[in-house]
């Protein structure tokens, strides 16, 4: 078997499921669920084979497919796919989270399940493509492609204001990416190639132009991350999206933004990256503090988690723009951590929402007594999200802050020092949320649910199966992150060497 | 060897018969057959020129035309059957639904 | 291989990871199977888990002694390796860490055993039997985390334990998360847990900054490399920064001014928790950190002085508050803060042996006091229960809810308890005398050593001695006050008359602790040849001058303590407090006593200066700035309205007025012309064919005749 083609197989395998789903009657919900789940699990399996064949010690692109695609005039657009240390973890995160998210929909999505699953698998194709594409044009195609299924996922299966939220989501992202398209075209035409590795090897973009190109890319990615102050689409999208949508949105889609920074902005425009590092770090710090404080004042659980994402991704951005290996490796690992923790948070919030149909803090309280398993799992996830040592969040946050503290590019320890306040604030809003839901006397929701003839039940076996894999990784990364760092280290070291050269 | 003019004449005659058939007959099937006649007239001419010019292009074209004609028969007959089903007639004078 | 051989070859050191894994195993067993186990079994598993950690600690100490205190590090697994950042899970066995291990697991095990009896009753008074198991799960987790803290070989591993014990503290303070301390439904206990966690996080923030500074200046976080690099290039600015950042962490964890505010509230936790975490072990982590970082602190005098002053000020400040408290556990809580102040002051002055010595003795007698207080509270609860359920009313199911709120921990409700609870009384007395520093109890020796150090170093650390002496005086006074109020005089309530003594499962561990509280001073007696602890610690912190007994200092402190007890007898013993009578100190001290009673309004100050502004800021940012301005106004009024205006402008004047008009005219003209042409479309295939034919003929004609 030729393993070189694996990235393509991983990317497009979900389409097999889509094809099968086309021929299944929508009424046959059980079959629809199982086909979608099996497809996503198989995709995960194939991605594990990909990991097996990935040589962690090699910093270069691996398992490359490079075919000419559109060659008109002097445009050399190619179908260029490959994997390296920057993307391998995100690919695995995507294939890992998709089955989990799908499994969580079994009781949450009741209408048009077939369509939902089709869109979801298509979304997976788009996301995987984004992480595998090594050609700017191809990347752009995948990038825009992810918008469509997500638009429908929010717009059809979302909450009461889903249309508003989905359009806002679509337009914000779209608006940003148009600037990126311009920059891509400029690069492709002037440099004669759209292939990212070739562009990096070519180099030689004048500093003045680098600034503009950097900004064009940065705006597109910053909206996606989202960086303060471009975040106002996020609370809407998260609150309105169905649980599985929120999981994927927080878990993977936001990472496309941060990934974009590390994949394109840093290596393509190293001089500009060095120049902008303090500004980006400054915005990241503002985002960390701002997101944390704003989270504290939310009364809607999902909104709180949404705002906390702004804070957490601020950490990722701070790490990336520390431009040293601790910062960037921590940043990449923190992308994964945030996907796991926040994904798990959204899953858990979805599980209680299915029973209570409200996300308003004030009616909750004392659930730990009624739902001990749920309370304990939520506690672990909450602690992971606020960066308790021994859990995954800490490893990421610590390395990021450490990197930023001594970063030459950022140039001052103040940024990291201020960001560390975010660690305090995280404890404040996360514990506040936990207390509101689980501690104290029983909230009014317990009665409300009883009046409807049910009683709050603890997690079902399926729900526990859904959440357990996430918990495993939360502990694994927290206690023994070595294998994860080992995957990204060589590529990042290469990148850091490029950036160091630009700095001096 | 028969001179090429003879073939052309035959072809022209066949073509005119076909054209007249299309113009004057009312039965759609007959019109259809007349169309086939015109196509074959063209085929005759092509084969004749091909042989006269020692070039195979004409004959290749003939094959194309025959294929197209076969396809056309399939589609055309299907259309006629469909029309007959809805109008119970294949008299072209009664089929003027496209009138402007 | 026999036992001593194993010790000499250092084989036992390989057991160090078990310190963490044994308690974790106990935790997992109780977590997974505990639901089906009896309470006794759960308690036994947990106690065994902690007890086996104690056995391991003893083995480690024994082996360490056999190899003459030579430091041993036991690498367990790699952790974070990025560039020059090399962090591993490595355990460190040296004389300092073994002392901590012994204290933590030893006192911890006794408290586990005690808790079997305590929680058995507590869960029944609170009517939630299922929570019994959870308590021991948390307790074992705490021991594991504490072991990571004391046995880590790098600042970061220490930090893992540091935050881990903070978590356990949060969980255990809020253990009765649906009640308040009086057993009423409330969020109060949960709030107290949160407060503790957040105050600790503020401290951890400082600790983190210290870690970052350390790494970027000394290139490592492993203790020995840091100290080596720091001694090689002692940059005073950097080291001052590191030590002061660390001090923020210390004030958080060890409850010093200004972050001590969480510890009194932490008494919301069940009493074994107060004893184990909030008196004996976790809160001393800050002291351990300073001693561990001794090579750094000894390099900068100014930072050391700040540490010592913070300790001394805390010692006095907390002692004054303790005088004005009525809750038996609150008094002990402030006393703990005060005693921690003693330790911090000691280690700040470089008197590491004295600090650790006091840490150990304090662990004994304060755990004893807390647990005895727990026994008293439960005794009161039993009396209360007896009264509530003993007088008929069995048919009234709601009687339980109609009961008046009764505070079993309020000393004003007690009185003459020595009659009802004689064992507890004697145990409490032992603890009190040790805490008050009466010869020859453990506290006397350790406190005296601190005072002596303060006196000797008065030149470099002015003021510390006086503050500490004053604090020692107050200590004896408030303990005397407590004894008179609780055990002497007349019962001030019915409940106190019906209080019952605790069962042996609770009193036996107390007796062990009492023995330690009485004879604990033997660890480090101020006579030549008896500086055991000092010599033991020398292996880690370098040469220590063994202090002799200074009769002057010892005499003064003893006189002060006796005087204080005498005063307390005058005020509370001679004329016992009557029911409803205000505190006799209220009159002579006036507003000063109001301040003591109300903890000098520090909580209110924090609320006004920190919490309220923060909430206002959060409200402003989230509601006004983020939602109303950015999300709604900017989005709706600028982006959306601007787009709408543009769309309207383009659609009405531009599109309809100009572009559409042109198109309309064009369409009109086309329509008119096609009107005339449509007649050609008659629908007959043949006429179309004819036109085609005619067309062909025309074209052919043109081609022929052109």
Image (cartoon, helix red, strand yellow):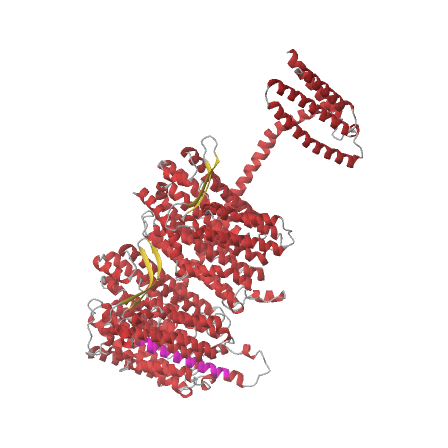
Evaluate whether residue C468 shows in this view.
no
Q: Is residue C282 left or right of residue C70?
A: right
In this view of the protein, which residue sits in the foreground, B26 or C530?
B26
Residue C384 painted magenta: yes
The residue nearer to you, when weighing A114 against A315, is A114
Question: Residue at the front extreme?
Answer: B1
Q: Position of residue A253 (x, y in %)?
A: 49, 49
Where residue C39 appears, as percent x and y from the top left, is 47, 78
Residue C238 vertical position relative to residue C15 in the rendered view, above or below:
above
Residue located at (55% from left, 57% from top): A103
Which secondary structure class fits the magenta region best? helix
Query: Residue at left 65%, top 11%?
Result: C705
Is residue C438 something one can see in this rendering?
A: yes
Look at the picture and state if A336 lies above or below A449. above
Q: Residue furthest top?
A: C705
Q: Is residue C341 left or right of residue C408?
A: left
Within the magenta stretch, is there residue A439? no
First to last magenta residue range? C361-385
Please, which residue is most extreme toward the bottom here? C419
Across and down, in percent, residue A226 comes to: 46, 48
Q: Quadrant of the C terminus of chain A?
A: top left
Q: Is residue C520 left or right of residue A236?
A: left
Question: Residue C65 in the image: x percent, y percent?
Answer: 25, 74
In this view, the residue in front, C252 or B73, is B73
């Amino acid at each position: 078997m030729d393993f070189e083609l694996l990235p393509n197989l991983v990317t497009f395998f979900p389409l097999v499921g889509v094809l099968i789903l086309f021929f299944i009657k929508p009424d046959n919900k059980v079959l629809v669920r199982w086909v979608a789940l099996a497809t996503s699990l198989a995709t995960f399996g194939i991605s594990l084979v990909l990991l097996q064949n990935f040589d962690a010690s090699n910093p270069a692109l691996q398992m490359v497919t490079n075919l000419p695609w559109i060659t008109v005039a002097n445009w050399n657009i190619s179908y260029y796919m490959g994997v390296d240390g920057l993307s391998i973890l995100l690919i695995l995160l995507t294939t890992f989270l998709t089955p989990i998210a799908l499994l969580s929909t079994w009781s949450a999505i009741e209408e048009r399940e077939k369509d939902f699953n089709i869109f979801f698998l298509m979304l997976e194709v788009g996301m995987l493509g984004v992480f595998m594409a090594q050609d700017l044009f191809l990347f752009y195609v995948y990038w825009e492609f992810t918008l469509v299924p997500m638009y429908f996922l929010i717009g059809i299966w979302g909450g009461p204001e889903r249309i508003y939220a989905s359009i806002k989501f679509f337009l914000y992202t779209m608006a940003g990416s148009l600037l990126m398209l311009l920059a891509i075209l400029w690069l492709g035409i002037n440099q004669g190639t759209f292939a990212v590795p070739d562009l990096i090897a070519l180099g030689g973009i004048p500093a003045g132009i680098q600034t503009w190109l950097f900004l064009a890319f940065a705006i597109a990615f910053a909206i996606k991350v989202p960086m303060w102050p471009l975040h106002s689409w996020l609370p809407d999208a998260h609150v309105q999206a169905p649980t599985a949508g929120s999981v994927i949105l927080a878990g993977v889609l936001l990472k496309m933004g941060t990934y974009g920074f590390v994949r394109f902005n840093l290596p393509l425009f190293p001089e500009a990256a060095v120049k902008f590092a303090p500004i980006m770090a400054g915005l990241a710090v503002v985002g960390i503090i701002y997101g944390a404080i704003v989270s504290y004042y939310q009364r809607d659980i999902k909104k709180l988690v949404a705002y906390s994402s702004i804070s957490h991704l601020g950490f990722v951005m701070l790490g990336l723009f520390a431009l040293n290996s601790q910062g960037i490796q921590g940043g990449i690992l923190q992308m994964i951590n945030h996907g796991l923790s926040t994904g798990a948070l959204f899953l858990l919030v979805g599980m209680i929402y299915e029973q209570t149909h409200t996300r308003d803090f004030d009616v909750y309280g004392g659930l730990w007594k009624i739902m001990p398993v749920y309370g304990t799992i939520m506690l672990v996830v909450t602690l992971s999200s606020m960066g308790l040592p021994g859990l995954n969040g800490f490893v990421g946050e610590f390395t990021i802050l450490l990197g930023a503290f001594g970063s030459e590019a950022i140039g001052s320890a103040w940024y990291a020092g201020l960001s560390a306040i975010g660690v305090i604030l995280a404890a404040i809003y996360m514990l506040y949320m936990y207390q509101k839901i689980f501690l104290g006397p029983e909230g009014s929701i317990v009665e409300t649910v009883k009046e409807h003839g049910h009683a709050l039940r603890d997690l079902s076996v399926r729900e526990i199966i859904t959440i357990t894999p996430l918990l495993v990784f939360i502990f694994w990364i927290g206690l023994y992150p070595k294998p994860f760092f080992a995957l990204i280290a060589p590529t990042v070291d290469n990148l850091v060497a490029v950036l160091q050269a630009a700095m001096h | 060897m028969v001179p090429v003019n003879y073939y052309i004449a035959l072809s022209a005659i066949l073509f005119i018969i076909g054209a007249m058939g299309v113009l004057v007959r009312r039965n759609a099937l007959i019109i259809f057959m007349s169309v086939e006649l015109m196509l074959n007239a063209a085929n005759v001419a092509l084969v004749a020129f091909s042989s006269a010019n020692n070039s195979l292009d004409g004959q290749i074209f003939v094959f194309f035309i025959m294929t197209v004609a076969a396809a056309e028969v399939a589609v055309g007959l299907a259309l006629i059957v469909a029309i007959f089903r809805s109008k119970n007639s294949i008299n072209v004078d009664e089929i003027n639904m496209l009138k402007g | 291989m026999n036992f001593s051989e194993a010790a000499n070859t250092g084989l036992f050191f390989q057991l160090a990871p078990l310190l963490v894994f044994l308690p974790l195993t106990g935790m997992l067993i109780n977590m997974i199977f505990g639901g089906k186990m009896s309470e006794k079994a759960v308690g036994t598993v947990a106690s065994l888990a902690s007890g086996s950690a104690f056995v391991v600690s003893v083995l480690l100490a024994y082996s360490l002694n056999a190899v003459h205190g030579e430091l041993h590090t036991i690498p367990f697994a790699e952790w974070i390796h990025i560039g020059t950042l090399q962090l591993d899970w490595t355990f460190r066995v040296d004389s300092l860490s073994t002392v901590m291990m012994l204290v933590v697991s030893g006192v911890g095990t006794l408290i586990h055993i005690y808790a079997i009896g305590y929680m058995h009753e507590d869960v029944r008074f609170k009517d939630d039997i299922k929570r019994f198991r959870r308590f021991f799960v948390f307790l074992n987790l705490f021991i594991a985390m504490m072991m990571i803290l004391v046995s880590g070989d790098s600042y970061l591993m220490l930090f893992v334990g540091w935050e881990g014990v903070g978590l356990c503290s949060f969980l255990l303070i809020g253990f009765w998360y649906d009640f308040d301390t009086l057993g009423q439904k409330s969020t109060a206990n949960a709030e107290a847990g949160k407060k503790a966690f957040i105050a600790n996080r503020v401290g951890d923030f400082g600790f983190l900054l210290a870690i970052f500074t350390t790494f970027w200046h000394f290139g490592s976080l492993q203790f020995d490399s840091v100290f080596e690099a720091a001694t090689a290039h002692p940059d005073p600015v950097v080291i001052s920064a590191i030590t002061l950042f660390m001090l923020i962490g210390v004030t958080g964890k060890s409850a010093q001014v200004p972050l001590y505010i969480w510890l009194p509230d932490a008494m919301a936790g069940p009493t074994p928790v107060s004893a184990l975490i909030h008196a004996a072990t976790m809160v001393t982590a800050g002291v351990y950190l300073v001693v561990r970082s001794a090579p750094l602190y000894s390099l900068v005098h100014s930072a050391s002085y700040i540490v010592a002053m913070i300790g001394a000020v805390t010692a006095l400040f907390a002692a004054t508050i303790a005088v004005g408290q009525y809750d038996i556990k609150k008094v002990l809580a402030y006393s703990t803060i005060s005693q921690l102040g003693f330790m911090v002051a000691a280690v700040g002055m470089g008197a590491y042996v004295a600090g650790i010595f006091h840490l150990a003795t304090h662990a004994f007698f304060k755990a004893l006091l807390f647990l005895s207080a727990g026994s008293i509270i439960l005794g009161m609860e039993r009396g209360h229960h007896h009264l509530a359920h003993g007088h008929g009313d069995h048919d009234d199911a709601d009687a339980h809810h109609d009961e008046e709120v009764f505070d079993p921990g309020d000393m004003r409700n007690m009185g003459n308890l020595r009659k009802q609870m004689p064992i507890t009384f004697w145990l409490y007395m032992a603890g009190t005398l040790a805490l008050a520093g009466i010869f020859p109890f453990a506290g006397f020796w350790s406190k005296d050593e601190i005072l002596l150090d303060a006196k000797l170093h008065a030149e470099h650390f002015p003021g510390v001695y006086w503050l500490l002496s004053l604090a020692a005086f107050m200590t004896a006074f408030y303990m005397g006050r407590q004894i008179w109020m609780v055990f002497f005089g007349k019962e001030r309530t019915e409940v106190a008359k019906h209080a019952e003594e605790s069962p042996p499962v609770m009193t036996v561990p107390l007796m062990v602790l009492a023995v330690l509280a009485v004879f604990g001073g033997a660890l480090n007696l101020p006579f030549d040849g008896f500086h055991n602890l000092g010599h033991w610690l020398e292996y880690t912190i370098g040469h220590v001058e063994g202090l002799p007994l200074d009769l002057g200092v010892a005499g003064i402190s003893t006189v002060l303590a006796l005087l204080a007890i005498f005063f307390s007898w005058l005020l509370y013993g001679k004329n016992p407090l009557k029911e409803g009578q205000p505190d006799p100190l209220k009159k002579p001290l006036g507003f000063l006593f109001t301040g003591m009673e109300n903890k000098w309004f520090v909580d209110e100050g924090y609320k006004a200066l920190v919490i309220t502004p923060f909430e206002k800021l959060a409200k402003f940012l989230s509601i006004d700035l983020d939602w109303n301005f950015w999300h709604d106004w900017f989005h709706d009024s600028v982006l959306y309205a601007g787009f709408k205006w543009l769309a309207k402008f383009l659609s009405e004047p531009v599109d309809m007025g100009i572009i559409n008009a042109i198109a309309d005219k064009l369409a009109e003209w086309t329509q008119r012309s096609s009107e005339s042409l449509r007649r050609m479309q008659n629908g007959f295939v043949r006429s179309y064919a004819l036109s085609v034919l005619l067309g062909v003929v025309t074209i052919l004609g043109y081609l022929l005749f052109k």
